[in-house]
Image: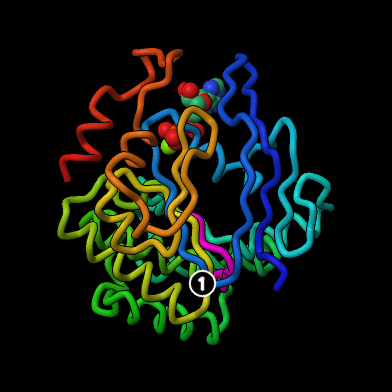
Amino acid sequence: MESLLSVKDVEKVYDNGTRALKGVSFELKEGEFAVIIGRSGAGKSTLLRCINRLISQSRGSIVFKGIKTEKASKNELRKIRREIGMIFQHYNLIDRLTVIQNVLHGRLGYMSNFHGIFDLYNRCDRRNALRILERVGMEKETLKRADQLSGGQKQRVGISRAMAQNPSLMLADEPIASLDPVSSGVVMDSLHNICKEDGISAIVSLHQVDFAIKYASRIIGIRDGLIVYDGDPKDLTESAIKEIYKKSPDDRMENKDENDEEKAIAV
Ligand SMILES: Nc1ncnc2c1ncn2[C@@H]1O[C@H](COP(=O)(O)OP(=O)(O)O)[C@@H](O)[C@H]1O
Ligand SMILES: [Mg+2]
């Protein structure tokens, strides 16, 4: 079977000279739930941003559903963005809008600007949005303003908004990093169930190794811009974890979180 996403020799050098990715390659098949782990500054967010084309890689290629993303036309780019749902650490909801309005925003990629601006979502979109909210246990909150929700509820709206796009790939960058353990579990359950039930592939970056092992069908460990582990969660030994979270020689204090290793192993 052809892979859904193929990342090949991807390098990213930021304008200030930081080499965030140093040659990353992997193939993602349909239905995989891949979790990326690694220290702060390892390159997790950079990789997710390259896949979604929020930024361009400096070298290498990323092919999504047969489209070479770095060569995508405007139309192809729209298709890529539509088919890739994004979930963010800080939710990125519009505070003054209601839950359902936020979810309907996920449909924007499918309509003209005119329709989006004037809120002309059709009945089918609304029904679909309600159904998704029900699936993540948010059906009672549909008319609440987003800023009245708890963190865990906000993230379930974030998942619902991404789902409204009808994506084939879900990217989530530290979706539970701002949540307490109980809400984290609820959010990860929602995300995992929805992806499993609908056959959506996912790449999720997480800080907590225990959550990674619990939900991942595959774990990708990144250290200092390189993949140092790629495999089954059950093969992730203590020493493999140490290897992933090991400090690299050129680790600079100012933008690295000293407690990463402790955090990861303590859980
Ligand atoms: N916009 C940027 N400009 C310059 N350097 C950046 C930028 N974004 C991230 N970096 C650097 O790239 C490296 C990887 O960062 P990032 O992808 O955010 O890692 P992670 O998500 O794993 O914490 C870090 O050294 C970080 O400081
Ligand atoms: Mg990050």
Question: Which image quarter: residue 221?
Answer: top left
- Residue at the (66%, 59%) spot, across then down: 5
Reply above or below: 260 against 163.
above
Where residue 223 sits in the image (x, y, percent)?
46, 32
Query: In terms of image quadrants, where is residue 212?
Result: bottom left
Give the image location of residue 103, x and y in percent.
44, 68
250 in relation to 40, above or below: above
Quarter in which the N terminus is drawn: bottom right
Q: Which residues are magenta?
A: 164-171
Which residue lies at the image location 54% right of the left edge and 45% below the top edge?
Answer: 48
Looking at the picture, which amino acid does disc 1 mark? Ala
The answer to which image quadrant residue 10 occupies is top right
Q: Is residue 169 magenta?
A: yes
Q: Residues within 10 Å of mark 1 (few under 14, many from 20)?
A: many
* Element type at mark 1: helix
Q: Residue at x 27, y 43 (%)?
A: 238
x then y, percent, for residue 75: 80, 59
Is 110 on the left or on the right of 220, as rendered? right
Across and down, in percent, residue 245 comes to: 34, 33
Residue 81 appears left or right of 189: right
The answer to which of 34 and 88 lies nearer the viewer is 34
Let me know if residue 216 is in the magenta part.
Answer: no
Vertical order, 144 against 52 (above or below): below
Q: Describe the colour scheme in one phrase.
A: rainbow
Residue at figure coordinates x 47%, y 58% from the top left: 34
- The residue under label 1 is 164
Nearest the camera: 152 or 247?
247
